Amino acid sequence: MKLWRRSDGRLIRTFTGDIGGIQGIAFSPDGQFLASASETVPGYHDGAVKVWNVSTGMIVQRLAYDSGFGWCVAYSPDGLTLAAGINSNVYVYRLSDGALLHTFAHSDYVLGVDFSPDGSILASGSEDKTVKLWQLSTGTLLRTLIGHTSFVDSVAFSPDGQTLASASFDTTVRVWRVSDGTAIKTLTGHTESVLSVAFSPAGDFLASASTDSTVKLWQTSNWNLTRTITDPEGGYLQGVAYQPDGQAVATAPIGGHPKLFQVSDGKLLTTYGHHTGDVMGVAFSHDNNLFASGAADTLVKLWQIADGKDIRTLIGHLDVVNSISFSPDNLTVATSSGSPSPDTRDATIRFWRVSDGTQLLLLPGHGGGTFSIAYSPDGQSLVSGGGDNLVKIWRTSDGLLLRTLTGHTFAVKSVAYSPDGTIIASGGGGEEIRLWKASDGTLLRTLPTENTSSLAFSPDGQTLVSGEESYGQNVRLWRVSDGTLLQTINADPFGFIQAVAFSPDGSSFLSASGYTFKISQWRVSDGTLLVSYTRETGWGPFPTLPVAFSPDGALFGYGRSDATVAMARNRFPAP
């Protein structure tokens, strides 16, 4: 779960610790706690329902340990009880001691629950196509509302408690009178499944969100449609909620960014989040002002380090963005893309003007995807490696291919220039690292290792660190002058190393595991582990965790497979 600041879209906190996918969340009435409903994973005594402390991000209570799917949660108005839809039942818990007060049954998965404003009635919607109203004081079924022709996945009481709205896969919203269960109105207009409904705080409007990428606002006095708001990303909208003052609605899309829209005119006010796919590449500008990220969503974003503001999105790639490199003068940023064969859609290298995002050059890149690029220290050339087993050197002024280096027999996953620009290092799957003379492409030496995923030169150019996609001894330090293996480190015995990076002072380096999502910092002199950062979350088709130090060494930035870009303080900066 992610907590965002509503005013400017900044990420406040990521709640980690749920093993299964999270399907439903709810704030406590006082805003101090969050409840989540998630799938329980066999073999883990985890609990389908959890209560989290908002200020600390810690789990304070676990409920519903039976295996199954937790689909939805809702707090009672007084915050003392919690209702959860798990499998085909509704469970009502007393939060003070976790006691189970009621169990209410449907004949299929329960997808939505809501308390009436006075806390006396609980409504539940189910895949059995019904809505049920339950009397909480007695635990009895008051009535069953029948009319939907497909799954009912969201229910909401009006603020006065007299009306209930239900959303369904049958593309409709139905409005019911609570006192006797009479169907008041069927709202039509969505063209696909309606996944969420919410009343405005004043009760004068009802919002509905659909997989047709729209939110519709209905006036409750006559149930007329007053406005349709369309998600500009075209996402399947699975959630909608009103801002407390009723002036805006928030949407939660599948595979897109949460957004806040102004109710009066449908204007997009804020987009929350970073990328919508795994973050594959990151880089700092050399003047320490900008941080760039590229992701599986084909986008490149430029972030202002001082305040974390997203200042520009570079749009043009048609495939996963794998690597990013700033020119030494910080005026240009180069990016490369391409999924591995046979899924490659765009293997190009693109050059962009940083000031306005204009695309300056487009290079063909490598067959089977361009996986890594790096500017030379003088900015006159760019080296690239890709799925065609080649290393290529390009002139940056006009994109001319200067030289192609052959010899690798597997995809080249990482390339790097030495700080003085005289040596190029390249590595890939299943074979040795190669060191080349940059001026003419002569092979200087090979370093015996396998499945190299990442390479980095020390600031003085005397040492090379390599990360491997292998278990156990998966980070190696090499002396560049003669290829001597200096150290071998078991950086993460349970996870492949996806990225390595030297600190600017050369005293430490980072290793990042894309499988256990752990970043570790090591002292170069003796290989001592200084610290491990283990707050990483998520999983994706391209497990990754790119890392980079800021030029002043005060920060390091990284990308995560939950589409998040993050920045952290370096706990071991240069003295």
Image (cartoon, rainbow, N blue to C red):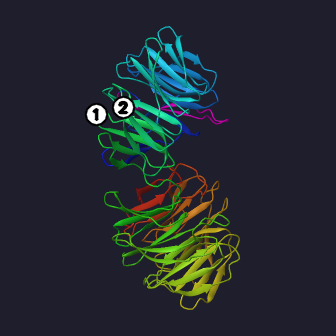
Relative image position of residue 313 (x, y in whole percent): 40, 62
Q: Is residue 412 magenta?
A: no
Identify the amino acid type marked 1: Asp
For image coordinates 36% across by 68% down, the residue present is 552
347 up-or-down from 165: above or below: below
Relative image position of residue 172 (x, y in whole percent): 50, 31
For image coordinates 49% across by 20% down, the residue present is 123
Q: Which mark is residue 245?
A: 1
Please identify the quarter of the rendering in which residue 332 is found. bottom left
Total number of numbered discs in the rendering: 2
Horizontal arrangement in the rendering, residue 140 relative to residue 309 (left or right): right
Quadrant containing the C terminus is: bottom left
Q: Which mark is residue 312?
A: none
Q: Residues within 10 Å of mark 2 (few under 14, many from 20)?
A: few
Range of magenta residues: 30-51
Q: Secondary structure at mark 2?
A: loop
Of circles 1 and 2, which is in front?
1
Disc 1 to disc 2, C-alpha distance: 16 Å
